[in-house]
Image (cartoon, helix red, strand yellow):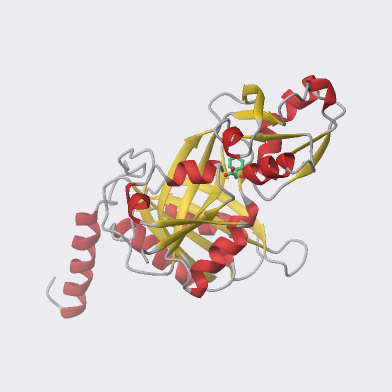
Amino acid sequence: MPASYAYLGPEGTFTEVALRTLPEAATRELIPYVSVQSALDAVRTGEAEAAFVPIENSVEGGITTTLDELVAGAPLMIYREVLLSITFALLVRPGTKLSDIKTVSAHPAAQPQVRNWLKKNLPDAHWESAASNADAARLVQEGQYDAAFAGEFAAARYGLEALETEIHDAENAQTRFVLVGRPARPAAPTGADKTSVVLWQRDDHPGGLRDLLGEFATRGINLMLLQSRPTGAGIGNYCFCVDAEGHISDRRVAEALMGLKRICLQVRYLGSYPRADMQPVEVQPPRLGTSDDEFVAAADWVARCQDGRF
Ligand SMILES: O=C(O)C(=O)Cc1ccccc1
């Protein structure tokens, strides 16, 4: 049996479409799971080699179920990311008219992307959350709901028709997906990489978050995501999910992680992987002293001082 990738199913999700854009997916068995949790569990138990799940969208931010799964439990690592532009179709059983629709369903992350359209076109329709957009389509096929927001491509799979297409409140809405596996040596740097970590503060004090962010700022590292998630230990207790430009093998990134390790209660490394947009990482101001060579030279100098060879 070939190694398998678990993904947020059932068949016909945006997740499946995004997964199939990865060359390595062609050589794996792709297995749909009913939820992000179950797909990631399959990785943790060794049932699947990796799982492919949505993690962030440009309209609403982080997909919290995915972030929370990565933050807690046995450590996992992000290997790859994919960006997909998203527009929704309104899928119904053949013959259904707009005026027949009393209930609509989709994944919760779809709601902020279709809210204005719904208000204008179906102001009285009742929203029912589904485990995924394709699952909403499946439930429409079964007769549980009247309409689903999903990819137009899901219509054929579930015997539905698209009453409307190209539904999107925000232009250029994109969703980011990640391939998650068990911890392993990160892939070699490409020059266009990002590094994901979760940070827990040691204590609550004024400027605490600034101290964490300062470890990146002083080394010229730009951030691409900062999302706080409750730790579950009471109101006001948060950890921070951070995506930073660069690879752990870049000296400035490694030094920032060392700085964070010293000042944080806990740091969870979630991986270094190529950016989907393949934009080369440019060191941000302060540029002075943030290149690999300068870190090496400075470390050499300290070693020579310690040796009395300066
Ligand atoms: O992949 C899907 O179809 C999902 O249900 C997740 C999702 C939700 C909203 C936008 C893109 C992907």
Residue 69 locus on image (x, y percent): 59, 63
Whether residue 199 is visible, yes or no, is no
Q: Residue at x 63, y 57 (%)?
A: 35
The residue at the point 48 percent across, 60 percent down is 197
In the figure, residue 137 lies in which quadrant? top right
Camera-side residue: 178 or 200? 178
For the point 73% across and 44% down, which residue is it? 139
Which residue is nearer to you in this view: 7 or 296? Answer: 7
In percent of width and height, residue 161 lies at 65, 27
Q: In the displayed structure, does residue 156 sit left or right of residue 101? A: left
| Residue drawn at the location 53% of the way across and 62% of the way down | 198
Q: Is residue 273 above or below residue 162?
A: below
Can I make out residue 23 in this image?
yes
User: Is residue 252 rendered to the left or right of residue 213?
Assistant: left
Q: Position of residue 259 (x, y in %)?
A: 42, 66
Q: In which quadrant of the rendered image does the C terminus lie?
A: bottom left
Q: Nearer the viewer, residue 263 or 141?
A: 141
- Ligand 1 quadrant? top right
Within the image, what quadrant is residue 272 found in? Answer: bottom left
